[in-house]
Image: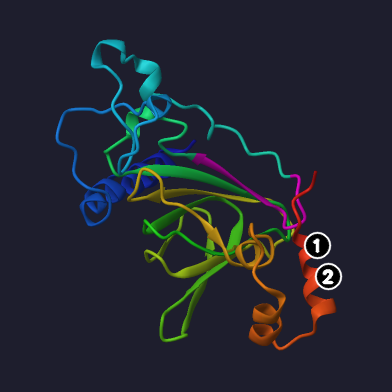
Amino acid sequence: MSPTNFFAILAIFSSAISIARASDADPLQDLCVALPSSGVKVNGFACKNEANVTEADFFFDGLAKPGFINNTVGSVVTAANVEKIPGLNTLGVSFSRIDYKAGGLNPPHTHPRATEIVFVLEGELDVGFITTANKLISKKIKQGEIFVFPKGLLHFQKNNGDKPAAVIAAFDSQLPGTLSIAAALFTSTPTVPDDVLTQTFQIGTKEIEKIKTKLAPKK
């Protein structure tokens, strides 16, 4: 990785930390390594006994290599959040790596608990978000450039090039959450009633069933 890329990624991380106070609550102790197995339901995770904390609780190497893409949209997200790095619990930051095939799309979605800032590792992307005033804010971004998606707003990334692309994304939440619009509407459990979908999209029941079939998770 070139020095330019390294310092740009460092800047993203610093930015994520600086805005963390606007999202997750501040920690009340030096560390609170997540212990999901405790079964205790809190806003976050219960803390692991500090005597049992190790360096492994703060380490993850899953973003070093491109993710394997095996889906119809042509992109894959590799998360580095509190579920992968227990030491992030209460710290209010997380990362993801997103890889795109040529023509790949990260479909319209939202992060209900975080602002997202992306840094392009390679390739070019057409990105955008939609405001509550129904205005599209979009731009083409390339290697070394940054774009911000405000908290909770619908957004997307599309690789319209003929080469793969990749970004590193930073969030001001240990677990930003992702709500994919198409998947939420057409593959939820229980399902959204067909009459709600037909009236919303002004299409027939047969079209709704076709979309559900195409979006259904592979078994």
Give the residue drawn at x 36%, y 43%.
Answer: 174
Label 2, on which residue?
Answer: 210
Q: Which image quarter: residue 150?
A: bottom left
Crowd band around label 1 with a 10 angstrom C-alpha radius: few (<14), some (14–19), many (20+): few
Residues in magenta, as a range: 70-79
Give how far across and how far down residue 207 sits, in percent: 82, 77
Q: Is 78 inside the magenta-drawn segment?
A: yes
| SS for callout 1 | helix
In the image shown, does 13 or 210 lie closer to the viewer? 210
Is there a contact, CB below 8 Å, between mark 2 and mark 1? yes
In the image shown, does 171 or 52 lie closer to the viewer? 52
Question: What's under tag 2, amino acid-wise?
Answer: Lys
The way the protein has been coloured in the rendering is: rainbow
Question: What's under tag 1, amino acid-wise?
Answer: Lys
Q: Which image quarter: residue 83?
A: top left
Give how far across and how far down residue 3 sits, in percent: 40, 38
Question: Which residue is farthest left?
Answer: 28
Q: Which image quarter: residue 70?
A: top right
Give above or below for 37 relative to 41.
above
Give how far across and how far down residue 119 sits, in percent: 46, 52
Give the residue drawn at x 35%, y 29%.
Answer: 34
Label 1, on which residue?
Answer: 214
Q: Is residue 98 left or right of residue 90?
A: right
Give above or below for 34 relative to 189.
above
In the image shown, does 76 or 138 lie closer to the viewer? 76
Image quadrant holding the C terminus, namely: top right
Give the residue drawn at x 31%, y 49%.
Answer: 16
Q: Which mark is residue 37?
A: none
Q: Is 192 inside the magenta-drawn segment?
A: no
- Between the residue at mark 2 and the residue at mark 1, the CA separation in whole angstroms equals 6 Å
Q: Is residue 38 left or right of residue 219?
A: left
